[in-house]
Image (tube, helix red, strand yellow):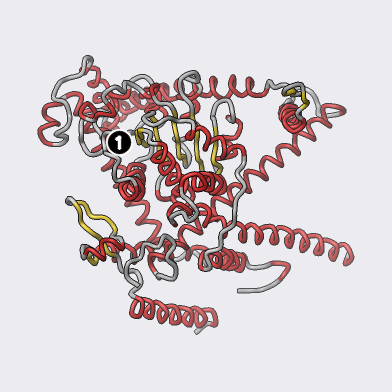
Amino acid sequence: MKNETRIWLVIFVFFAGFLAWRVGDAGASRQYVRELDGRVAPATLGDLVAGTAQFSFSRTVGVWVAAALTLGIFSFLYRDNAFYKLAESVLVGVSAAYWMVVAYWDVLIPNLFGKLWPSWVQSWAIPGLSPQHDEFWYAYFVPLGLGVMLLWRLSPRGGWIGVWPLAFTIGATAGLRLVGYFQADFLGQIRNGIVSLAIFKDSHFEWERSIENVVLVTGTLACLSYFFFSFEHKGALGRISRVGVWVLMITFGAGFGYTVMGRIALLAGRLEFLFDDWLWLIDQNHTRIWQ
Amino acid sequence: MRFNWDNIDRRWIFLMMLITVAGPIIWQLAFPEIPTPYARAVFDAIEDLKPGDKVLVAFDYDPASEAELGPMATDFVHHCCEKKVKMYFVSLWPVGPVMVQDAIRNIIEADYPQMVYGQDYVNLGYKSGYEGVIKVIVTDLRSLYPTDTRGNSIDQLPMCRDVKNIQSMKLIVDVSAGYAGAKEWVQYAAVPYADKMKLVSGSTGVQSPQLFPYLPDQMAGLLGGIKGAAEYEMLVNERYSGPTPAPKYQEALRRMGPQLFAHLLMIGLIIAGNVIYFTQRRREGRSR
């Protein structure tokens, strides 16, 4: 047996013993629910006192599956392995299925079939839907037709029919995004960059805001000069573009810092789940009703 | 695994990070926050609302970002409940309505049972189409949302009867994990209808640097990652939660403990990396 395998075996045995102790002694990972008006929700201390809290086998299994998948994903940090692959595949499969079901019930049914055949949809899917047609309801035959044409891509013949709705989608999206970016980013950012360099309030000079605006304007101009390639970056232009590089570097550094913060928050979230819901080492929200 | 200062196995760093983040969670270390002007602007935007004002709350995130965005979503809903505004929940992400349902169960139903579904809050759910959804609902909400997530016609919900489009909202509150999210709300709602709609957002750390240029003209306030959430949480708790806020309203502040120690480790690693690099270079220079 290799030395590395021996170390991992000891760690696994130790952790399995710890897990058995937590489950056996403290009852870790057990989930309790209460039912009210046909809806099931996590039980609270009040439910325990009222005697309405019930042990939930399915939710307890859910916690164990979630913990196993979390550890499976974490195991990639050591090296690629079968547990990681399994967890990754489960995530991809479940996400795809979930998206499909949600798109069917939240979009296709109410927004397409519900518009074209409202009384039929009302009779079997959405009782709250109005059985009346909208004013221009027949316009919804266009997206229906485009959708059917898109599915033609799956057919061995006439695949070109699926290209037309794709062209429509790409063209419409490009047009939509062009307007959005032009208004909010191009024109809007130029407008935001035109600021007063010396700010006075009640005839008092405001140092802090003035310096802020000077940094904003000079930083923007320096960065723009770095991307100005019509002249060689020599002399004054070279020096200004060098300042632009520094400003860009500081921006990237700030972006990196924010990314690190985000990733640590995600790690903390998963560890909280493992320590709280699974192992019962902590009780962050003081919601545990069985100790 | 090898341990060599010149070429440390990266798994040692992962282990150090795990211990550094796990420690403050187990010992539940938290530190006070000083709110930045951006977090204060978000707080003020909601604070300026009057009881009964309409607020569109967009939960554009999923469980993958829950650890980062969940606390600020909780604080937004908590604050809106305290202000007694009418909340219209929507989502541009398929799993968003589940996050909304969680917030409704954990905050509104638990702590504000007097609030009535359909009169004080409604979950309109998810629609596909990304920015296309925003583009439609700024002029016509009803064509895209004929029903809520419970299958009720929005004509039957008292708080939706007089809402033609989202221009009647006093404020848009967006919790954003990426595309589609805060950027699209700026581009298709806050900027084209700047005289009618005001937007505040809470976003992931990764997305925040892209959104800062929109402040303050195109976006009234921004919570950047868990740090922004902690600052905002402190402001909301100071005003509404009394001396001992419920633990669920301190989630963001709690997550700042691991942040502090993890960042100290990162800074230490960057310094150590540079020291090792320059030491190595000097050694190589001598050996030539």
Which quarter of the image is occupied by the C terminus of chain A?
Answer: bottom left
Q: Relative to A47, is B167 above or below?
A: above
Q: Relative to B196, is B101 above or below?
A: below
> What amino acid is labelled 1 in the image?
Val
Name the residue located 56 percent from the left edge and 45 percent from the top edge. B228
Q: Nearer the viewer, residue B119 or B11?
A: B119
Give the number of marks: 1
- Can residue A72 be seen by looking at this rendering? no
Q: Nearer the viewer, residue A222 or B155?
A: B155
Q: Give the quadrant of residue A231.
A: top right
Q: Position of residue A107 (x, y in %)?
A: 27, 33
Name the residue located 38 percent from the left edge and 22 percent from the top edge. B168
User: Label 1 lies in what chain?
Assistant: B
Q: Position of residue B136 (x, y in %)?
A: 36, 23
Q: Circle 1 sits on which residue?
A: B122
Q: Nearer the viewer, residue B164 or B276?
A: B164
Name the residue located 60 percent from the left edge and 44 percent from the top edge. B35
Q: Count neighbours of disc 1 (C-alpha within 10 A) and say few if under 14, some if 14 to 19, many if 20 or more.
A: many
